[in-house]
Amino acid sequence: MNVRRYLLTIGLALTLVSVFDGCGFAADGPGDVIAARLRLQGYRCEKALSTERDAERSKPDSAVWIVKCAEGVYRVQLVPNMAARVEQIDESK
């Protein structure tokens, strides 16, 4: 059941990206979707410079991404039906 919610959440995000892309708000991939989530939650990330999935910390119903923005580096855990868990990490790690 949790896998269905996760896939539904990702599908909804990708649908929104395609809709906004047609309105002139281009998104280049999952990094831009996660950057948008960061901004919605009050973090500064104008554009994701790089995005890497953290396979070691990810679970089937909870994906974890390392997102590098010009303003900082964040570990973002996407949980269906909840706000993302965000941790700002040191760039030297």
Image (spheres, rainbow, N blue to C red):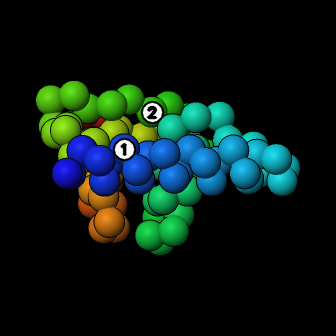
Residue shown at the point (56%, 44%) measured from the top left: 14
Q: Is residue 41 above or below residue 10?
A: below
Tell me the residue at 29%/47% (across/down).
4
Front one among 6 and 40: 6
Camera sees residue 38: yes
Mark 1 secondary-structure assignment: helix
Q: Amino acid at mark 2?
A: Thr
Query: Label 1: which residue?
Result: 7
Q: Quadrant of the C terminus?
A: top left
Residue located at (19% from left, 51% from top): 1
Left or right, 91 with respect to 71, comes to left
Q: Nearer the viewer, residue 34 or 92?
A: 34
Q: CA distance from mark 2 to mark 1?
A: 19 Å
Looking at numbered disc 1 in the image, what kind of residue is underneath it? Leu
Q: Residues within 10 Å of mark 2 (few under 14, many from 20)?
A: many
Left or right: residue 22 compared with residue 93: right
Residue 45 in the image: state x and y as whole percent.
54, 54
- Would residue 35 be visible to someone looking at this image? no
Q: Is residue 79 left or right of residue 20?
A: left
Q: Which residue is at 35% across, 38% downward?
A: 66
In the foreground, 41 or 69: 41
**Mark 2 or mark 1, which has the lower sequence index?**
1
Residue at numbered disc 2: 51
How crowded is the residue under tag 1: few (<14 C-alpha within 10 Å), some, or many (20+)? Answer: some
For residue 72, which numbered disc appears in the image? Answer: none
The reply to whether the C-beta atoms of the residues labelled 2 and 1 are less than 8 Å apart is no
Q: Position of residue 6 (x, y in %)?
A: 32, 48
- Say which element carries label 2: strand
Residue 85 placed where, x, y %?
27, 60
The image position of residue 26, as x and y in percent, is: 75, 43
> Looking at this view, is 70 or 3 the one in front?
3
Camera-nearest label, 2 or 1: 1
